[in-house]
Amino acid sequence: MLPSLRNPKPLVSTVLALLIVVAQIVPFLSVETLAGPTTPWDVVQAGAIHWGIVGGLALIWFFVQLFWKAPVESTKLGLAASATIFWLALTLFFNYADPTYGGPVAFFSLMGGLGVVLLWTRFIADEIAF
């Protein structure tokens, strides 16, 4: 029997990127909810729990990218899909009205969008052989 030529690394990378974004935005993992009046944690412990979950997922995502043996094109596709998810999360959920950080983050969000378009232009081109 021949081994499969398909590698699940891009799919796993995409799912982990979605989990990182969801862990950032779900209300039941927010610091305000975790440090509520009916929970046993204070604000510092709730922040440690929230950022521990997000950082743990990011570390798993990093180790998948670094140590999972896969074809180079599969790795690049997984990184492009993850970058797209992170960029979309930034553009949809960031508060650009903040006078301190709104303008610079908006500029780099636009530049990140250009980078995402260039990444997907490479994958949509017909010259790539998987």
Image (cartoon, helix red, strand yellow):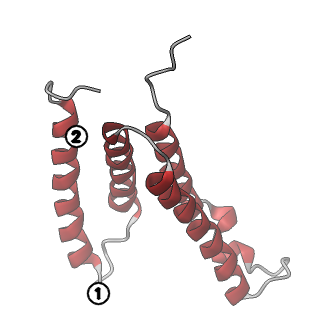
In this rendering, the answer to whether 65 lies above or below 37 is above
Q: Which residue lies furthest to the front in this view?
A: 1
Local SS, label 1? loop
In percent of width and height, residue 101 lies at 29, 81
In percent of width and height, residue 43 lies at 69, 87
Q: Which quadrant of the view contains residue 122?
A: top left
Residue 125 falls left or right of residue 78:
left
Q: Can residue 21 be seen in this view?
A: no
Mark toward the viewer: 2 or 1: 2
Q: Residue 37 carries which label?
A: none
Q: Which quadrant of the view contains residue 86?
A: bottom left
Q: Indicate the quadrant containing the N terminus: top left, top right, bottom left or bottom right.
A: top right
In this rendering, the answer to whether 8 lies above or below 55 is above
Residue at (66, 77) in percent of width and height: 32
In percent of width and height, residue 10 lies at 43, 39
Q: Is residue 62 visible?
A: yes
Residue at (21, 69) in percent of width and height: 108
Gap between marks 2 and 1 measured at Cα:
32 Å
Local SS, label 2? helix
In this rendering, the answer to whether 77 lies above or below 63 is above
Q: Which of 60 and 17 is in front in this view?
A: 60
Q: Nearer the viewer, residue 22 or 126?
A: 126
Q: Nearer the viewer, residue 69 or 35?
A: 69
The residue carrying pointer 1 sits among few (fewer than 14), some (14 to 19) or many (20 or more) residues within 10 Å by Cα, namely few
Residue beneath disc 2: 120
Q: Which mark is residue 100?
A: 1
Tag 2–tag 1 contact (CB < 8 Å): no
Residue at (53, 44) in percent of width and height: 15
Q: Nearer the viewer, residue 77 or 40?
A: 77
Q: Earlier in the sequence, mark 2 or mark 1?
A: 1
